[in-house]
Image (cartoon, helix red, strand yellow):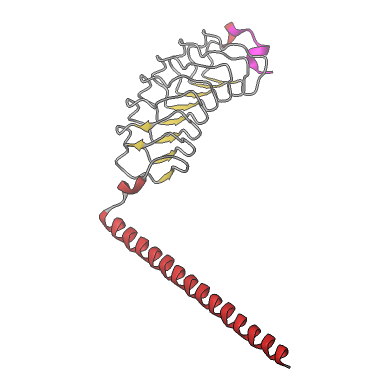
Amino acid sequence: MCILCTEDHTTLTNLTDLNCYNCSNVKEIPSILTKLQILDCSNCPLVKEIPPTLTNLKELDCYNCPLLENIPSNLTNLTNLYCFHCPLLEIPSTLTNLQILNCSGCLRLKQIPSTLTQLTQLYCFNCVKLKQIPSTLNNIYNINCSNCYNIYYIGIKNKPNRYNFDNTRFDNYNWYTHKDKFKYKIAVRKINNFIYKFYIRKQKQRVLALQLWYYGLQDMKDIILEKLIK
């Protein structure tokens, strides 16, 4: 139970912060709560929509809402949006003030809008339909796109402080400086040399084993002949 279940909604019109996290009874967020700046309706299985009247929202936590398919496009004051594990079809391109976006596990999401140029943190792992990250998102310093199997292009020019591209088709080699690339080439050369020497060593071991096997057969033949003669 949360405050929406116990109070008359008309008495809540001055609320700026509403937390109805994990409330299985809430079916809708009242549209009259226009002063809300922070809303947490995560893990509310019956919530189907976020009212477009909540234009003062700055932070919206609506993750794990299995019926929520859309985020209103006029919530342009949003800076933090946590909508992971929702069946969202898209992230509105009008949310240009977003700084933190977590849309991980949104299996129907096909793109991150190129207009979200203020983003500093992007978490979109397990978004299997995503194919690219726009080149306009150059303020990002923390990004996780792991398990986005179809991502082949990430246009961010500056190397983020933290990033994870495991199980994607993206090669982040272009982020390295010339000095880094030189170190990278030397490291690759050392690894190749090690592999070559290891291979040669194995080949020598195989030849030695074959020789021992051959001489072993010769010794056995000589022993058998000696016994037959006797």
Q: Position of residue 155 (x, y in %)?
A: 31, 36
Total of numbered circles in the picture? 0
The residue drawn where x is 61% and y is 80% is: 217
- Does 109 appear above or below 74? below
Q: Nearer the viewer, residue 207 or 55?
A: 207
Quarter of the image where one finds residue 200: bottom left
Say whether residue 3 is magenta: yes
Q: Position of residue 178 (x, y in %)?
A: 26, 55
Say whether residue 30 is magenta: no
Q: Nearer the viewer, residue 125 or 83?
A: 125
> In the rendered view, does 7 fall on the left or right side of 79?
right
Quarter of the image where one finds residue 7: top right
Q: Position of residue 210 (x, y in %)?
A: 54, 75
Q: Quadrant of the N terminus?
A: top right
The residue drawn where x is 47% and y is 41% is: 167
Q: Quadrant of the C terminus?
A: bottom right
- Does 184 appear above or below 226? above
The residue drawn where x is 42% and y is 44% is: 163
Q: Nearer the viewer, residue 77 or 43?
A: 43
- Give the magenta-colored segment's residue range: 1-9
The residue drawn where x is 31% and y is 51% is: 176
Furthest-front residue in this view:
229
Furthest-left residue in this view:
178
